[in-house]
Image (cartoon, rainbow, N blue to C red):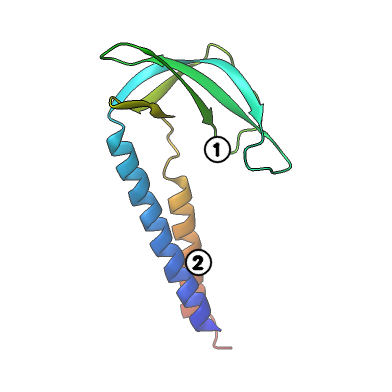
Amino acid sequence: MQIVFLLLGLLAIFHGISTLEQKRRQRKKLTSITTGIVVDNVYKNPYHHDEPSYYRVVEFFTNSPERLVRIECLDFGRNQPHKLEQKVKVCYSPYNPENAELVHNYWWFPGVFVICVGCGFVIFTLFAPIW
């Protein structure tokens, strides 16, 4: 049984590290940062769960060539409408501005969380009494 927990822990650590690396690469491709404005809130249920979520509808201008882009952004764990005309930072690719995301400080959270869970399994396996 301990080998199962050890393997699960190592797998979780590997998955967490790969998630962090994937997010880092994705953010590296989005090289331009600008300020956008929340123009609307859309309430929808994209994954057919019991609780729909609010999406921010954000408009921003690209730097060159200048054009208006509109995107919908789901906030992690957010289930309340956002303030209209709120200014937000947007990170986008100059080659494909529709592939944009809001600049958050918690982009690393899912990867670190999975790594911590994996470390917990490994520590439990190494220091728990043999069953």
Asked which quadrant contains residue 80, the reply is top right
Outermost residue on the right side: it is: 50
Which residue is at the front of the view, 72 or 76?
72
Secondary structure under badge 1? loop
Q: Distance between the residues labelled 2 and 1?
A: 24 Å
Tell me which numbered mark, 2 or 1, is placed earlier along the sequence.
1
For the N terminus, give its image quadrant: bottom right
Residue 15 placement, left or right of 72: left
Image x and y of residue 123, in percent: 47, 72
Please, is residue 71 above or below residue 27 in the view? Answer: above
From the viewer's perspective, is the residue at label 2 or at label 1 nearer? 1
User: What's the residue at 68%, 42% (across, down)?
Assistant: 48
Asked which quadrant contains residue 105, the reply is top left
Q: Which amino acid does label 1 sit on?
A: Phe
Q: Which amino acid does label 2 sit on?
A: Gly
Please, is residue 98 above or below residue 118 in the view? Answer: above
| Residue under label 1 | 76
User: What's the residue at 49%, 82% (across, down)?
Assistant: 3
> Within 10 Å of the Cα at label 1, are there few (<14), some (14-19), or many (20+) other Cα atoms?
few
Outermost residue on the bottom side: it is: 131
| Residue under label 2 | 120
User: What's the residue at 36%, 27% (across, down)?
Assistant: 91
Image x and y of residue 65, in percent: 27, 13
Image x and y of residue 88, in percent: 45, 20
User: What's the residue at 28%, 36% (across, down)?
Assistant: 29
Asked which quadrant contains residue 18, the reply is bottom left
Image x and y of residue 5, in percent: 52, 76
For the C terminus, give its image quadrant: bottom right
Secondary structure under badge 2? helix
Please, is residue 66 above or below residue 108 in the view? Answer: above
Residue 18 placement, left or right of 29: right
